[in-house]
Image (spheres, grey):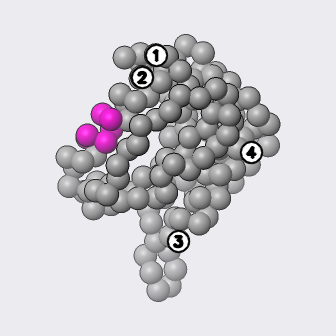
Amino acid sequence: MAGDAFFSLRNGLNAMMGELKTNPTALETVTISIITFSSQAKQIIPLTDLLKLQIPDLVLGSGTAMGSALKLWTQCMQREVMKTSATQKGDYKPICFILTDGEPTDSWEDMADYVRNNIVGKQANVIGVACGPNADTNKLCRITETVIVLKQA
C-alpha cells in the first residue's frame, strides 16, 4: 500500500481508534489484531484489548499477499478467538476489515473461496475496504459481499 491510499488507511485507523476509545462499551469489549500483507503476511499485533493497544507505525511495502494474509488470519482466529463452551462464554463474532489498495500478487483465489464459504457470516463478519483508485473491488467481492470504498483524505 502506498501514496494516498496508505495515508487514507492510516487516517481512517486513527479515527476508528479515537471513536472506539470514547465508547464505554467498546472499552470493555473490543479487542484488535492487525495483520499486514505486502510481499508477505505478518501479524504485527496479536488479539489485544483496546485499552492496551498501541498502534505501531505502519510500514509501506510492495506487493499484496492477500492469499497469505487470509490464511494467516484464519489461523490466528483459530488460535486467539475464544469459543463459547459449556463452561465459558466465548468472544463475540469477530469483525474483520480487509483493506487493500490494489490486486493480490500471490495465489489468493482458493483462500478467498474458503473464507467466503466457511468463515463469512458463520465465524466472522468480513468487510472488504478498497483504499485508493487502484483497489479492485471485484477481488474483494470474491471474499465477501460487503465491500466499501474508502474516500480519499
Rendered image quadrant of residue 150: top left
Q: Earlier in the sequence, mark 2 or mark 4?
A: 2
Residue that label 2 marks:
7
Closer-to-camera residue (129/34) = 34
Q: CA distance from mark 1 to mark 2?
A: 5 Å
SS for dot 4: helix
- The residue at 55%/13% (across/down) is 133
Image coords of residue 51 (percent x, y) = 28, 56
Are the residues at dot 3 and dot 4 in contact (C-beta closer than 8 Å)?
A: no
Q: Earlier in the sequence, mark 3 or mark 4?
A: 3
Q: Earlier in the sequence, mark 2 or mark 3?
A: 2
Query: What amino acid is at disc 2?
Result: Phe
Query: What amino acid is at disc 1?
Result: Asp
Q: Most prominent secondary structure in the magenta stretch?
A: helix
Residue that label 3 marks:
83
Image coords of residue 146 (percent x, y) = 54, 35
Magenta segment boundaries in residue numbering: 14-19
- The residue at 46%/71% (across/down) is 90
Are the residues at dot 1 and dot 2 in contact (C-beta closer than 8 Å)?
A: yes
Residue that label 1 marks:
4
Q: Nearer the viewer, mark 1 or mark 3?
A: 1
SS for dot 2: helix
Image coords of residue 44 (percent x, y) = 51, 48
Q: Is residue 136 magenta?
A: no
Left or right of 89 on screen, residue 54: left
Q: CA distance from mark 2 to mark 4?
A: 28 Å
Query: What amino acid is at disc 4?
Result: Met
Location of the N terminus by quadrant is top right
Residue that label 4 marks:
111
Closer-to-camera residue (58/87) = 58
